[in-house]
Amino acid sequence: KAGVTQTPRYLIKTRGQQVTLSCSPISGHRSVSWYQQTPGQGLQFLFEYFSETQRNKGNFPGRFSGRQFSNSRSEMNVSTLELGDSALYLCASSLKASGIYEQFFGPGTRLTVL
Amino acid sequence: TQLLEQSPQFLSIQEGENLTVYCNSSSVFSSLQWYRQEPGEGPVLLVTVVTGGEVKKLKRLTFQFGDARKDSSLHITAAQPGDTGLYLCAGEDNNNDMRFGAGTRLTVKP
């Protein structure tokens, strides 16, 4: 079974630009969560999508948005990039089976904002 | 303030030594996971514990879930350089949200 894939793996942008990151979950997984990871803040939850609906949202500004398609693939978008948005963006998919919530992560997209 | 507190934050040991890292919270979790992350990669799920007092073994790694389901520990026996990485614990809270600790960065020197 193929794992979670994320594209692109690396991205360099300049301040003020916008970026779209893509995530393909494990086949059959309907839940996709996005996280931002930085050395100072660790893993910070951005949002979770389940069956094309945003189920939960972390404490990030409105510049961060996402969506999920009918095939469970998900995208996240960051507009008006700031230097502080430089981070590893991780996507995780989950089956969300009864009672146990296990997440499987992709390799991440390393975003550098200059 | 992290909902899940991990300690120590950094740990550097010699190959062959034993170590324990901790994950503590004042909240109860319905399940708790341990992940290991290597530089530039996503976290890899090691284990999920669900029952209070549960102990799971994965080769040289032993995971324990506290009786009250508020804390967990990871013990590694005879550490090897391949064990080097960032160890993260994550818990599913009563709202079915996943919370992550800040991690323990382990370095095992040959």
Image (cartoon, rainbow, N blue to C red):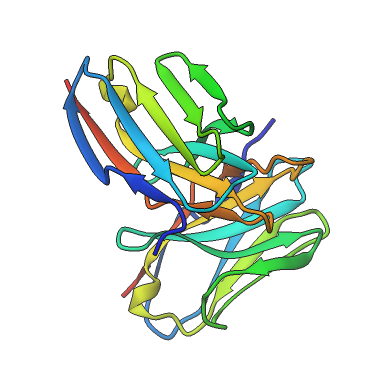
Quarter the N terminus of chain A occupies: top right
Q: Where is residue A63 in the image (x, y as percent from the top left)?
A: 54, 82
Q: In this view, does A19 lie above or below B100?
A: below
**Residue at x-position 20% and y-position 18%:** B15
- Compare residues A7 and B11 and report the one nearer the observer: B11
Q: Does the image show residue B20? A: yes
Residue A111 seen anywhere in this rendered image of the structure: no
Query: Hey, which quadrant is residue B41 in on the image?
Result: top left
Q: What x and y, as percent, mark residue B52?
A: 59, 32
Which residue is at the far front?
B68
Q: Nearer the viewer, residue A69 or A105?
A: A105
User: Relative to residue B25, is residue A28 depicted above or below?
Assistant: above
Q: Residue A106, how many percent across, how many down?
A: 55, 46
| In the image: residue A50, left or right of residue A82 | right
A52 versus A1 height, above or below: below
User: In the drawing, does residue B80 fall left or right of residue B88?
Assistant: left
Which residue is nearer to you in this view: B16 or A91?
A: B16
- Horizontally, is A37 left or right of A95 in the view? left
The total number of labels drawn is: 0
Residue B101's x, y, as percent?
43, 51
Q: Residue A99 lies in what quarter of the image?
A: top right
Please indicate whether residue B79 sits to the left or right of residue B42 in the image: left
